[in-house]
Amino acid sequence: MIDGPYFWLTVLGVLGTGLVAGVFCGFSTFVMRALATLPPAQGVAAMNAINTTAVMPAFMIVFVGSAVLCAVIGVVTFVLWPESGTAELLVGSALYLFGCFGVTMVANVPRNEILGRLDPGTSEAAAYWPSYVREWTFWNHVRTVASAGAAVAYVLAIT
């Protein structure tokens, strides 16, 4: 069994990845569905406001902090190669770093940047909105599953 500081790093990994999974799950299950029911100008304006608010410290500490923590856990696991939980720790780290953080950078953020450059009341914003909702939500589902999978993998590593 993992013990000492390594155990507590993993517990923090469970907490961080689980919190992020919860946020993303909320977006996938009801926030994006609600925004999609609004007229495009209102949906675009609301999502742009959400995207602006999301980069504030409260969420970014958990989101980026979890990525740093997962990287540390992955490196420490690779270097120490513990007797138990090695595969789970490496899988958990990979799921979060690639499936959550990486997907955010290559799939969700670019869509947010395009949406942020659009004036909500324009025909261009109205035309982009349906594909934005569909594609952004798809990639958010991926982030949700990856974050939750990372949390589960870390729990399995410490049990």
Image (tube, rainbow, N blue to C red):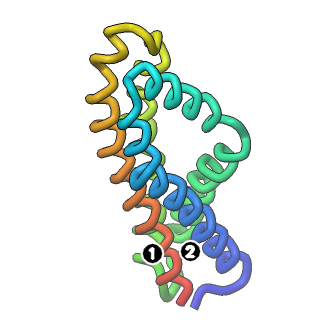
Tell me, yes or no, if residue 52 can be seen here. Answer: yes
Residue visible at 48% across and 62% down in the picture: 93
Residue 54 position within the rendered picture, expressed as x and y whole percent measured from the top left: 61, 38
Does residue 80 appear to the left or right of 42 in the view shown? right
Mark 1, residues whose alpha carbon is within 10 Å: few (<14), some, or many (≥20)?
many
Residue visible at 60% across and 49% down in the picture: 63
Disc sitting over residue 80 in the figure: 2
Residue 72 position within the rendered picture, expressed as x and y whole percent measured from the top left: 60, 60
Does residue 153 appear to the left or right of 136 in the view shown? right
Pointer 1 or 2: first along the chain: 2
Mark pair 1, 2: CA separation = 18 Å
Residue 40 position within the rendered picture, expressed as x and y whole percent measured from the top left: 38, 23
Which of these two is toward me, 145 or 35? Answer: 35
Residue 129 position within the rendered picture, expressed as x and y whole percent measured from the top left: 33, 25
Tell me, yes or no, if residue 113 can be seen here. Answer: no
Give, as a three-letter code, the residue at label 1: Ala
Does residue 118 appear to the left or right of 57 in the view shown? left
Residue visible at 46% across and 75% down in the picture: 152
Number of numbered markers: 2
Q: Nearer the viewer, mark 1 or mark 2?
A: 1
Which picture quadrant has residue 95?
bottom left
Disc sitting over residue 153 in the figure: 1
Element on which disc 1 rests: helix
Which of these two is toward me, 148 or 119? Answer: 119
Mark 2, residues whose alpha carbon is within 10 Å: few (<14), some, or many (≥20)?
few
Residue visible at 45% across and 75% down in the picture: 153
